Image: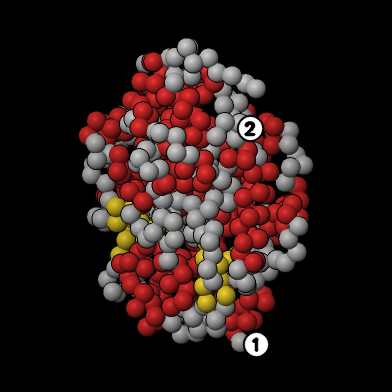
Amino acid sequence: MSDLSVAYYPGCSAVGTSVEYEKSTRAVCKALGIRLEEIPDWSCCGSSPAHTVNHVLSAALSGRNLALAADMGHDTVATPCPSCLVNLRTSARKMEDPLFRGKVNELLDAPCGPAVEPKSVLQVIVEDYGLDHVRERVRKSLNGLKVACYYGCIMTRPPELMRFDDPENPMSMDNLMEAAGAEPVPFPLKVECCGASSGIPRKDIVMRLSGRLLKAAEESGAEAIVAACPLCQMNLDLRQRQVRKANGIDRGLPVFYFTQLLGLALGLPERDLRFDKLVVSPKRCLKRIAGA
Amino acid sequence: MKTTNMNARDAEFIHEVEERSGQQVVRCYQCGNCTAGCPYNFAYDIPVNRIMRLVQTGQKEVVLDSKSLWLCGSCQSCTTRCPNNIDVARIMDVLRHMARETGHASERNIKLFADTFLESVEKHGRVYEAGLMASYVAQTGKFLNDLDLAPAVLTKGKLSLKPHPVHKREAVEEIFLRFREKSKQ
């Protein structure tokens, strides 16, 4: 498994609001021996705004990056961000149609040929690397920490496009956390939307949807939420005080990226996993894991 | 109660939605699964199954005026659960495109946020989150909206204060320029 090497697309939030996801992703992959080769000069995939404006424009913004990844000689491009992932996958899939690909190529400097396959970092770790290999590398158990694994809405949906895990009840992250020694609790809202990017223009929507998630996670007995999406993590962590206030929730719940907890289990130093970037303090959880 | 004139059927509208989405709207038999799972339904003015019905009956103005098109978060719940394999979220996306093109924007700030986001991408090649926020706030005047987040954002360094432009910024800018040229044709 040491020769697993993929093109890597960090996505814009990796250099902004989700630096800790980016750093911990790199640290974890390095420890597992998965080589992430960053796409040189990657640009934004356009996120949701692009596909709500025009599908050819959206595919071209992703297509530029897919072409760069193909130039690197890789057949897989991995990204930590589900929003980037859905754009890259949609673009790759739609460009299988020569007519559509022609329209996309009219917008690009260099034509994009048959595309490489985009996958999430989670999928690469669970499917291509394998849980058994992860288990072998666990150095420090997460000590039965009760976690609610939250996949977000688009990591596995729509199933025909994403082709990963179960669209309604995914288990890959639960299994990964279990391999790392945590205790995933049943979390019925694991693919329910957090309100996505409506936080800024329509805060009321995020208060309601993220409020439901926090309440359900709290009621499930989880000591922490584990996320795999920069936008979900931001709504649940950075906005958690607003959300709790709007919904009358007392207790704070730390919201980790799955790579941060996996990194701990692999025995990586805390400074490489950037727990200091989390807004809701993870201290109590980290102490629990350390067994203090 | 708001009523809809079913005699005013715009066949061209139905055809355009089907063509652009690659979906057959006629296959919707109004089971309501999409609405049952829609997390945004509480905020919608028209539930998603009724949007589908209104498209089937060619109610162009009512549909393109709907706030729901802008509030949809593309969470794929409707598409995933449709028993007839209709990509409902894709239809919502296409309706949003058509609403834009015809000057319908019933949720102005959501449209403005998307526009400001893309302007940032066009300018820097990657979205510059702090710049996007500053520009959005300047245009809407909503200074107090998220002021309570400022301490956490600043102490945690959650927003990079400078952009991370790509080297070939022009390559991304060109995508937008060509797109606008093509759209005029």
Give the vertical position of A99 relative to A214 (above or below): above
Give the vertical position of B128 relative to A229 (above or below): above
Q: Quadrant of the N terminus of chain B?
A: top right
* Horizontal arrangement in the rendering, residue B175 relative to residue B105 (left or right): left
| Residue A269 x %, y % | 53, 78
Secondary structure beneath dot 1 equals loop
The 10 Å Cα crowd at callout 2, few under 14, some 14 to 19, many 20 or more, is: some
The 10 Å Cα crowd at callout 1, few under 14, some 14 to 19, many 20 or more, is: few
Closer-to-camera residue (A23/B72): B72
| Residue A234 x %, y % | 60, 55
Q: Chain of mark 2?
A: B
Q: Residue at x 43, y 62 (%)?
A: A170
Q: CA distance from mark 1 to mark 2?
A: 48 Å
Hey, which quadrant is residue A176 in on the image? bottom left
Residue A113 can be seen, yes or no: yes
Which residue is farthest top?
B8
Residue A28: which numbered mark, if any? none
Closer-to-camera residue (A182/A291): A182
Q: Residue at x 68, y 69 (%)?
A: A281
Amino acid on which the number 1 mark rests in the picture:
Ala
Give the vertical position of B156 relative to B52 (above or below): below
Closer-to-camera residue (A171/B145): A171
* Horizontal arrangement in the rendering, residue A150 relative to residue A40 (left or right): right
Residue B103 can be seen, yes or no: no
Disc 1: which residue: A292
Residue B109: which numbered mark, if any? 2
Q: Chain of mark 1?
A: A
Amino acid on which the number 2 mark rests in the picture:
Asn
| Residue A73 x %, y % | 24, 55
Closer-to-camera residue (A255/A30): A255
Q: Residue at x 48, y 39 (%)?
A: B32
